[in-house]
Image (cartoon, rainbow, N blue to C red):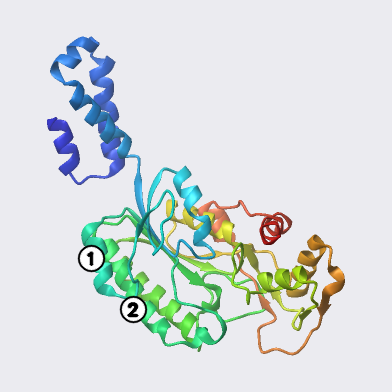
Amino acid sequence: MCILFLYHIVKIKKWVKTVVCVGFYCIITGLLKVKRTNIISYITKLELCIFLFWYIMIGMKKILITGITGLIGQYIKTPLLEKNYEIYATSKSHIDGVNTINIDLLDTNQIDKMFSNNKFDYLIHLAWGSLGGEAYKNEIHNKWKETSFHLFQKFYESSGIKAVGAGTCFEYIPKNTHIIETDNLGSDILYPQNKINLYNDLLDYTEKNNNNFAWGRIFYTYGKNEKPERLVAFIINKLKADEKVVIKTSHLIKDYIYAKDIANAFISLLESKVNGAVNISSGKPIKVGELAMEIAKFMGKESLIELHEEFTDQNLIMVGDNSKLVNEVGYNNFTPLSEALKDIITLHQ
């Protein structure tokens, strides 16, 4: 029991504790060739059960997820459970297999209370305010930046191992070639402005305090349960109703990535040794008009697509270079567009 007590109070890395536990277990069960009956005479059955329970539990890595019910977050639970994570999530509703914490992420006092009652090994911060319509320009993004920094700070102060934040491709100043992580940042819109500021502040903080921190800059996302005003959901819903779909800027070239792949990429980034910014993108350019036609083709309704190339102040190309994600993080399991659309459209039907 003394060993159990020391195991519990000594603040060393879990892998060290694992080695100690495995070594101790081997010693008491065979290396010293002591008969099992003699072992039991020194260690009660109860103590042995407690020891084995602790050994099993050290394999559980506690992770906090924000935004778990969102477009990306909905895909993150299953792979985390498969990897033996104990999941905690900020959510107002019950989620099977997840320990939910009902807090307002814009309230720093509630964040403080959460960390006073819990300690987490890892953090993936996906949550942010609404982005639809004019919401990109809303002052609420300033508040999200402020409280998000506080969330990361409290995580590290409570001995968190690594955190990953969700950035956006709109942090970059657009250019007509593939965007890499070292390209210039800048925007006059509040949403990406605050993402940039949060990233820079966290980078300074984590470098000064020798913390592990990564930032996934997400490119154009599509997936299940999208808001109806988003492009892919808009096209699918229109075609389901046998209505004509007019794409006014079909010539724009973008980088679309399935939300399920983003969730898996974030987990890979969390588990890797890579810190700093990483593009979360497919790296494959596709015209908006081509994407619309792919959806219509799958639904057998190509005749309902009407493509135009009207003038827009949007940049012609917005495509990410995902070399760092593939070569350094080691993530290369991208879902083909046809397969992803099949999953999404089947759900809509």
Along the polypeptide, which appears first: circle 1 or circle 2?
A: 1
Residue located 14% across and 30% down the image:
1
Image quarter of residue 142: bottom left
- Location of the C terminus (image quadrant): bottom right
Indicate the position of residue 196 as horizontal and vertical percent values. 44, 78
Drawn side of residue 109 relative to residue 253, left or right = left
Q: Which residue is mark 1?
A: 113
Vertical relation: 22 (above or below) 281: above
Indicate the position of residue 46 as horizontal and vertical percent values. 19, 25
Residue located 24% across and 72% down the image:
109
The label shown at residue 47 is: none
Residue 280 visible here? yes
Q: Which residue is mark 2?
A: 146
Indicate the position of residue 324 as horizontal and vertical percent values. 54, 60
Drawn side of residue 16 relative to residue 181, left or right = left
Q: How many residues crowd mark 2 within 10 Å: few (<14), some (14–19), many (20+)?
A: some
Vertical relation: 56 (above or below) 97: above
